[in-house]
Amino acid sequence: MSQLLSAVNDALNDVMSAKINITPETDFNEDLDLDSVLFVQFLLTLEEKIPGLMFEPDQINQDAFTTVGKLIQWIEQHLQLESSDV
């Protein structure tokens, strides 16, 4: 399991108070039934687990992050952009 996938899994376990095993294909709505409040809590928890990650309010769009894989892809791109800005 990649470091990002592991961090996402840990954050989901924290927010949902359950042991969850995810894959990049896991759908936040269909497979996990995350409502918008839980999704925002999940993103905030994820920020704590991944150094340098910060979601801006206008970036928090659950439709853009339909699967774990899409979220990880966005995080990888975002962290890469942050490091190139330095």
Image (cartoon, grey):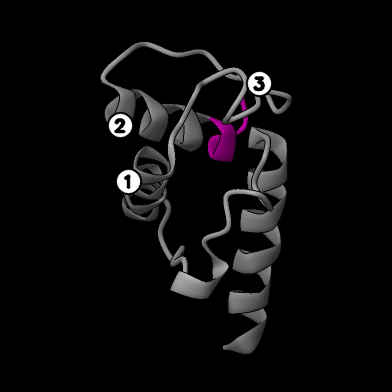
Q: CA distance from mark 1 to mark 3?
A: 20 Å
Residue 23, numbered circle:
3
Quadrant of res 77: bottom right
Q: Secondary structure at mark 3?
A: loop
Residue shown at 56%/40% (left/top)?
4
Q: Residues within 10 Å of mark 2 (few under 14, many from 20)?
A: some
Q: Position of residue 84 (x, y in %)?
A: 67, 82
- Above-or-below relation of 41 to 9: below
Assess whether mark 1 and mark 2 are in contact (beta carbons under 8 angstroms). Answer: yes
> Where the N terminus falls, by quadrant?
top right
Q: Position of residue 10 (x, y in %)?
A: 39, 29
Q: CA distance from mark 2 to mark 1?
A: 7 Å
Q: Secondary structure at mark 2?
A: helix
The residue singled out by tag 1 in the image is: 41
* Front of the two marks 1 and 3: 1
Residue situated furthest bottom in the rendering: 86
- Along the viewing direction, whichever of 17 and 36 lies nearer the viewer: 36
Q: Main secondary structure of the magenta part?
A: helix
Q: Position of residue 78 (x, y in %)?
A: 63, 67
Q: Is residue 59 left or right of residue 39?
A: right
- Along the viewing direction, whichever of 79 and 23 lies nearer the viewer: 23
* First to last magenta residue range: 1-5
N-terminal label among 1 and 3: 3
- Above-or-below relation of 86 to 78: below
Q: Secondary structure at mark 1?
A: helix
> Where the C terminus falls, by quadrant?
bottom right
The amino acid pointed to by label 3 is Thr
* Front of the two marks 3 and 2: 2
- Along the viewing direction, whichever of 45 and 32 lies nearer the viewer: 32
The residue singled out by tag 2 in the image is: 15
The amino acid pointed to by label 2 is Val
N-terminal label among 3 and 2: 2
